[in-house]
Image (cartoon, rainbow, N blue to C red):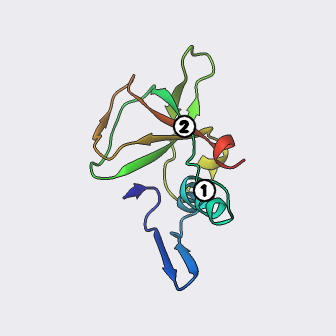
Amino acid sequence: AIKPGRPLAVGKIKNTFMICLPGNPVSVHLLYGMIVKPFLEFLCGAPLIQPRGIKATAMFSMKKKNQRMEWLRVNIIKNSENLSVNRYYKQGSGMISSMVFTDGILEIPENISYISRGDRFIFYSFKELFN
């Protein structure tokens, strides 16, 4: 399971692929960049290339539910030596503004239940995802 991003369904009937996306705008946008776009490019003959992320340091702490991966919208901290990010305060899957006022997402694995300041995770830039 992914937050935001559920439910997601991918299927094939005869020679036709179907991708069913959730109704919330942020969920659709993130699933498109992370899963749908690479899949469609692959179907068009391009090599299957997963989005490239880079390690970033979380400059915040928070609890998270186990058993699901989470994509947190974050902003890059400009004055840091290493790539550091802050969590955007609006994380709801209907918060379209979070896609405009952030730099990308920080992917938190499903086995993590608490994020401590200084923990490192993979950051995906919106410029890379949607270019």
As drawn, 65 above or below 112? below
For mark 2, give the secondary structure.
loop
In the image, which is nearer the foreground, mark 2 or mark 1? 1
Bin the neighbour count of mark 2 within 10 Å (Cα to Cα): few under 14, some 14-19, many 20 and up: some
Cα distance between the residues tagged 2 and 1: 14 Å
Q: Nearer the viewer, residue 104 or 44?
A: 44
For mark 1, give the secondary structure.
helix
Q: Amino acid at mark 2?
A: Gly
Viewed as shown, does residue 4 lie left or right of 125? left
Viewed as shown, does residue 30 lie left or right of 5? right
Query: Sequence order check: which comes first, mark 2 or mark 1?
Result: 1
Q: Residue at x 27, y 48 (%)?
A: 66
Mark identifier at residue 86: none
Q: Where residue 52 appears, x then y in whole percent?
A: 57, 40
Q: Where residue 14 appears, x then y in whole percent?
A: 53, 86
As drawn, 37 above or below 16? above
Bin the neighbour count of mark 1 within 10 Å (Cα to Cα): few under 14, some 14-19, many 20 and up: some
Q: Nearer the viewer, residue 123 or 63?
A: 123
Mark identifier at residue 53: 2
Q: Where residue 84 appears, x then y in whole percent?
A: 52, 24
Q: Amino acid at mark 1?
A: Pro
Q: Where residue 29 appears, x then y in whole percent?
A: 60, 58
Quadrant position of residue 25: bottom right
Cβ–Cβ below 8 Å for labels 2 and 1? no
Residue under label 1: 38
As drawn, 79 above or below 55? above
Q: Residue at x 57, y 45 (%)?
A: 51
Q: Nearer the viewer, residue 116 or 110?
A: 110
